[in-house]
Amino acid sequence: MEKMTEQQFRTIGNMLRKRSLWMLHYCTGCGSMELPAVGTSRYDMERFGVVPYITPRQADILLVTGYVNTKTLRRIVTVYEQMLDPKYVVGFGSCPINGGVYWDSYAVIKQLDRYIPVDLYIAGCMPRPEAIITGFMHLMELIDKGKATGYKRYKENLEYYKENQRKVLE
Amino acid sequence: MNILDRIKQLNITKVNVQRENRIFVDTEKDKLISVLYGMKLIGFNQLSIMSAVDRIKDNEFELFYVLYNYKEKVNAIVRTRIPRDNPVIETADKIYPPAHTYERELTEMFGISVSGNPDSGKPFILENWKDKPPMRKDFDSVEYVDKHFVFRNPEGKNE
């Protein structure tokens, strides 16, 4: 039998990986309200292999639902660093994108991707369950093509992320 | 004797019944603790919330304690004013234990120090806060945001 190349190995890995995404939902804001609808029988995200999970060690996706305080950011960074590779971050709602309605708040950070690498944003306030499922499908596509490389970016640009984190947290 | 008459017997400045079951009680800073104690004796057993308002035009803080009487089903709001420069109040946590936590929040958000409360001044909600207390009216939130956070470029080209 011919030996498998590394590229082929990765392709098969990605193909299998995208069908079994375990999701850690970090529910900070109002976004968590949409998740029961997505998870239960009406929309049923388990059809696509997305399952809510409870520990960072076993999860693949970190779902940040809603605004992120400076105080919450410290916990999010800890949770993100606890997760095992490969890991993907999904920003959910308009608040992690640009602050949303909290644009002038002293406690809320304005761009999540300055502090941890975000693979995908689901825009909306709030996104409907259909939008969430479309977002997950899009993430699967990215994983399949090998484009969801947030965890690699975090390792390569660790200085940049750590400096930004230090600016708000210390 | 109804509840209003019993409140009027306390050592207070003004009683104002704005609508049914909502009594505003104004008092002075020195008599605040004795008034609260009297209110508890009358039957106002619950401290629902306690906080402050920054009356920056008068250069004063307005403190308020929202109390509730379960027997008569009456709300009473005890209010007092303290000077804005170097504000110090006395703790009420011996009378109403929930005041302990509210006072910690008061110290952090308004910079009002509470004597008699050992936890006043300990970090509570904000972590590593070095600026002015954020609930004061002269704290400029937009200026703080501009200094500490970076907004996303609307064209989508970020750095």
Image: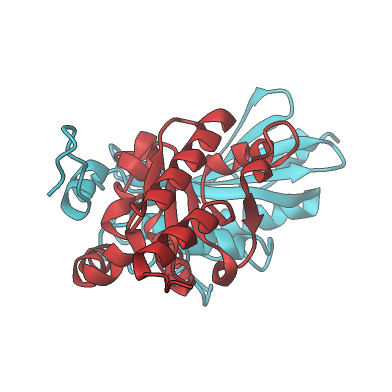
Residue closest to the far left: B159
Q: Residue A106 vs residue A48: left or right?
A: left
Supply the letter of whichever chain is cyan.
B
Which is more toward the observer, B20 or B132?
Answer: B132
Number of residue marks: 0
Q: Residue at x 28, y 56 (%)?
A: B85
Q: Residue at image x 26%, y 55%?
A: A114
Q: Where is residue A137 in the image (x, y as percent from the top left)?
A: 50, 40
The percent coordinates of residue B115 (x first, y second) are: 48, 71
- Residue A115 position, x and y percent, is 30, 60
Residue at x 74% of width, y 51% of height: B46
**Residue found at x 55% / y 66%:** B91
Q: Is residue B142 above or below residue B109?
A: above
Tell me where residue B141 sits by quadrant: top left
Q: Colour of chain A?
A: red
Position of residue B134 in the picture relative to residue B98 (left or right) = left
Question: In front: A80, or A88?
Answer: A88
Left or right side of A46 for A148: left
